[in-house]
Structure formats: structure tokens, C-alpha cells
């Protein structure tokens, strides 16, 4: 029985890690043809196989948009929303911004404290602060991967989800829903938010 439970926990962690990796890939960098093709391959089955009706619907809408949009349109949308400093559509994706109205606020201090408690530091590939969406998603992936090695990893995951990731994803999703020009990333953010809401149930 204990072995069965361990296998079940491993399987759950693998699924959770996969979903966070997928979510991170939406926002990490400007996508190329290979990455977009990979999204299409992964998202389409989730429209019927996702473990909740709301996540399946989010996947269905995202899959449809990925089918309709070409690579150039997706790349342009990403650039305008997340890269171009002169774009009026630029999205701020740090947790501090939505709490303090500026970057490098209290949320950044808190997430650095959480990371220090787990002996983790930001990966060198990231230029963004630790409370930015891509870094937070990466941190969750690392906490999941190192559950057996880190002290209180599950507690840290729960804090990361409740206090940082879900509130930030909700703010970003709400902001993107008001962008009348964006077609893909409002759906990516809705997919992420829906997944995080589902993942909350893992800790109940």
C-alpha cells in the first residue's frame, strides 16, 4: 500500500511539473515555429482530456487560437505585450507591481526569503526579478522536482501558489482580457489561471 501511495505521489508530481513547464513556456521567451507546433500538439488533447471542465474549455479556446494564428502574428503579439518598452500594451508581470504599484517591492523581499529558506537562488538565465511570472513558475517546477530533497517543499509550494503565483496570474489575466488587440495571450493567461486554481485543490 505504501508503495502504491508513493507511485501515485510521483505520478501527481510529474503531471504537476509538466503543467508548470507548459505554462512557463508560454511566457518565457518569444516563441518560434518549433515551440508553437509543440503547443499545438500538447494543447489539443487537453481540450478533451483535462481533469476539469474549466481547464478543458480553456484548452479548447487556446487550441483554436493556435490553429488560427500564424507564427508571425504570435511573435508580434508577444513582443508588444512583454518586450517592447515603448508599447502602450506592455504588461508588467511582477507581483510587486500589482501590490505596490512599482517593481522591487515587498513581494520581491518575501519571495527571496522563501527561496533562501529552501536554499534556492534564481537561475542565471533570468534577467527578471524573482517575483516575475516566469521566475515564479520556474521556482515551482524546481520545488516539485526536489520534493524529496528540500525541507518543507510542500509548504513552500503552497505558499508560492497562494501568495504569489495565483494572485499574480489573476492580475495578468484580467489585464490581458482588456487588450482588444491580443488574441493568443489572453487565452494563455486564462489557461494558466485555470490550471493554478485546479492545482489549489491539491493542497486542500
Image (cartoon, rainbow, N blue to C red):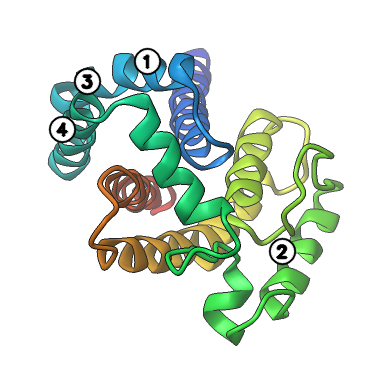
**In this view of the protein, which residue sits in the foreground, 53 or 151?**
53
Q: CA distance from mark 1 to mark 2?
A: 34 Å
Q: Nearer the viewer, mark 1 or mark 2?
A: 1
Tag on residue 60? Answer: 4
**In this view of the protein, which residue sits in the foreground, 4 or 17?**
17
Q: Nearer the viewer, mark 2 or mark 4?
A: 4
Which residue does the numbered mark 2 point to in the structure image? 111
Answer with mark 3 or mark 4, whichever residue precedes in sequence: 3
Query: In the image, 65: left or right of 40?
Result: left
Q: Nearer the viewer, mark 3 or mark 1?
A: 1
- Where disc 4 sits, the SS reads helix
Asked if disc 2 and disc 4 are in contact, CB closer than 8 Å, the reply is: no
Asked if disc 4 and disc 1 are in contact, CB closer than 8 Å, the reply is: no
Residue 114 spot, x, y in % from top left: 75, 60
Q: CA distance from mark 3 to mark 4?
A: 7 Å
Query: In the image, 203: left or right of 102?
Result: left
Tag on residue 124? Answer: none
Tag on residue 44? Answer: 3
Q: Mark 4 packing: few (<14 Cα in 10 Å), some, or many (20+)?
A: many
Answer with mark 2 or mark 4, whichever residue precedes in sequence: 4
**In this view of the protein, which residue sits in the foreground, 5 or 22?**
22
Residue at (44% x, 36% y) in the render: 75
In terms of image quadrants, where is residue 204?
bottom left
Q: CA distance from mark 4 to mark 1?
A: 16 Å
- Where disc 3 sits, the SS reads helix
Q: Is residue 172 above or below residue 64?
A: below
Q: Mark 1 packing: few (<14 Cα in 10 Å), some, or many (20+)?
A: some
Amino acid at each position: 500500500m505504501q508503495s502504491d501511495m508513493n507511485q501515485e505521489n510521483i505520478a501527481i508530481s510529474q503531471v504537476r511539473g509538466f503543467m508548470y513547464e507548459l505554462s512557463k513556456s508560454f511566457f518565457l521567451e518569444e516563441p518560434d515555429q518549433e515551440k508553437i507546433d509543440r503547443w499545438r500538439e500538447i494543447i489539443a488533447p487537453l481540450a478533451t482530456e483535462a481533469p476539469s471542465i474549466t481547464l478543458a474549455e480553456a484548452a479548447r479556446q487556446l487550441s483554436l487560437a493556435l490553429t488560427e494564428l500564424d507564427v508571425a502574428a504570435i511573435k508580434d503579439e508577444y513582443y508588444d505585450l512583454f518586450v517592447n518598452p515603448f508599447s502602450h500594451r506592455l504588461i508588467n508581470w511582477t507581483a510587486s507591481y500589482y501590490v505596490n504599484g512599482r517593481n522591487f517591492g515587498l513581494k520581491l523581499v518575501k519571495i527571496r526569503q522563501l527561496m533562501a529558506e529552501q536554499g534556492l537562488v534564481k537561475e542565471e538565465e533570468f534577467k527578471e526579478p524573482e517575483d516575475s511570472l516566469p521566475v515564479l513558475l520556474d521556482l515551482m517546477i524546481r520545488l516539485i522536482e526536489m520534493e524529496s530533497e528540500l525541507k518543507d517543499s510542500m509548504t513552500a509550494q503552497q505558499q508560492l501558489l497562494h501568495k504569489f503565483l495565483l494572485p499574480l496570474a489573476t492580475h495578468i489575466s484580467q489585464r490581458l482580457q482588456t487588450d482588444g488587440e491580443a488574441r493568443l495571450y489572453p487565452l494563455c493567461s486564462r489557461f494558466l489561471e485555470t490550471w493554478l486554481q485546479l492545482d489549489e485543490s491539491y493542497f486542500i
